[in-house]
Image: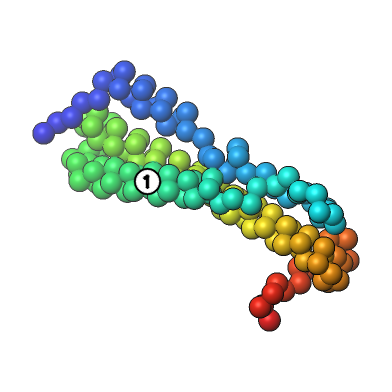
Amino acid sequence: MRCAIRGGGVTVLAAALLSCTSCSWILVKQPPLVPIASPLPTGCTSSVAAPVVDTNIAALFGALGIVSFGAFLGVSPGCHSLQDCDTAVLASAGIAAASMALATTYGLSAAYGFSSTESCRDLREAQVSCLTGVEAACRFLKGGTGELPPGPGEP
């Protein structure tokens, strides 16, 4: 069975893929480079919602890329040049490549988001610890040491 994707379908697919954005790069705000030693909010993002969304989208694009690549391998043995290949073969290769590129983009965005939100939570925890009298946390916030002191119950 041969599938043909018309020019309009490819255009719509390309527009849909290009309009995708990575949530974490847009929605996650990093903590300030210099920690704030006050009870004021840090203004950074501590929620992992955006990185979780990015991770799920990366997984979906990755799965689509693997399936498309499998379809390409299944129908391409007689395809020795572009003239021998039909539109379905070329489309499956293109979809596989675009899907894997988008999966990589979303994966990198998720990694950025998880890292930034963890730093934000650490900073907020240090602020609370400093306010409750933990001197090591106050030194960390003032830039005296590069390491955050262990939290309650940590060695």
Q: Residue furthest bottom?
A: 155
- Identify which residue is drawn at 21% across, 26% down: 4
Q: How has the structure been colored for display? A: rainbow
Secondary element at tag 1: helix
Q: Quadrant of the C terminus?
A: bottom right
- Identify which residue is drawn at 72% across, 74% down: 150
Q: Quadrant of residue 76?
A: top left
Residue 59 seen from this side? yes
60 sits left or right of 137 in the view: left
Task: Give how far across and how far down residue 51 sits, in percent.
Answer: 53, 49
Q: Quadrant of residue 98?
A: top left
- Identify which residue is drawn at 76% across, 62% down: 128
57 sits left or right of 116 in the view: left
Residue at numbered disc 1: 60
Q: Is residue 35 above or below residue 27?
A: below
Q: Residue furthest left?
A: 1
Residue 140 seen from this side? no
62 sits left or right of 46 in the view: left
Closer-to-camera residue (31/100): 31
